[in-house]
Image (cartoon, rainbow, N blue to C red):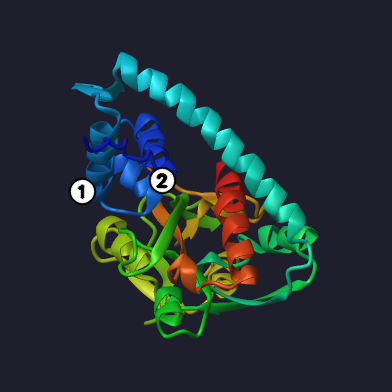
Amino acid sequence: MQKRTRSVIKWDDLRYFLCVTKAGSFLGAGKMLGVDRTTVSRRIDVLERTLGCKLFTFDDDGFRPTPAGRGVMSAAERMACAAGALEDLRTDANDDIEGTVRLAVSVSLGDAFIADIVAFHEQHPRVAIEVAYVSDPLATLSERRADLAIGVSHEAPARLENVLLGHAEVAVYGPADRNIAGVPEFWIGWSEDIPKAFADWMRAYAPAGARVNTRVNSWDALKRAVLSGGGVAPLWCMLADREPGLARLDPRADEHRMPLWLSAHASEKRNAAEQAAWAFLSVRIPQTLNV
């Protein structure tokens, strides 16, 4: 008589399960993981067949764990803690990692994450990071001119491994020392290198007939143009709010946030230095965005 073997429970499937419990939907979990909802649904289906039980019920508030699902969630959370501890041990064991990592960052983001990049060197002092500010970091990555990329995209970049770092808020700003009443007449915009997400913002929320009288191609130039009184502009709140000379104006739109992604080629193609930078930034930058 042939002996039946049990299917192996994969940690990666449990990781998807935990994301669904946090997000309340396959779509939300997919955004957290940088995959589409179909992939999440397939992983949950595999896990349910492996365990032989239903893990979720669905109501108006989204997916809720069943009693069996709550038990799995408790065990999976313990496994997540154990995995984190193992990752810490691996980090401690790899203090001798060295190399150079090329990081492409959207020029629109300015120096938003420089402090995070510098903090990486406290853990891996022998790894150098070369930061290039470019108009299209994902194209730079695809062309193999970068090892990692941080960029703005409404959807998870295709054919890459991605981590959703978070959503950064955008609003309209003007100089704090000027009283701008009503609809601003002059706007400052990006040149032809404008990130697509900003172009979409301008099309959706700039008033009809808005005059863009100055165009620039860097965050610092955009900020300086606004401070000089050249007009108003949509700016990242995480950068503009720390500038005392800038004041947030009524954007005439609902709160607007743009997804930020950390992207790279498949993990098996990354060396130890690239993997160390990937692991660090994928945790550190979301913390920065939530501050």
Q: Is residue 44 above or below residue 58?
A: below
**Residue that mark 1 sits on:** 38
Which tag, 2 or 1, sits closer to the chain's start? Answer: 2
Which type of secondary structure does the marked residue at label 2 adopt? Answer: helix
Looking at the image, which is closer to me, 111 or 42? 42
Residue 227 placement (x, y as % from top left): 60, 65
- Which circle, 2 or 1, is nearer the viewer? 2
Task: Please state, as top left, top right, bottom left or bottom right, where the N terminus lies in the image.
Answer: top left
Residue 108's spot in the image, x, y percent?
Answer: 50, 69
Q: Quadrant of the C terminus?
A: top right
Whether tag 2 and tag 1 are in contact, CB under 8 A, the answer is no
Relative placement, left or right, of 120 versus 22 is right
> Is residue 105 left or right of 119 when viewed as pictured?
left
Residue 64 location in percent, x, y? 29, 22
- Residue at the outermost top position: 67
Tag count in the figure? 2
Q: Which residue is drawn at 78% across and 71% down?
A: 126
Examine the image and state in which quarter residue 19 appears: top left
Q: In this view, does 276 lie to the left or right of 201?
A: right
Q: Label 1 sits on what residue type?
A: Thr
Mark identifier at residue 12: 2
Q: Which residue is drawn at 55% across and 71% down?
A: 225
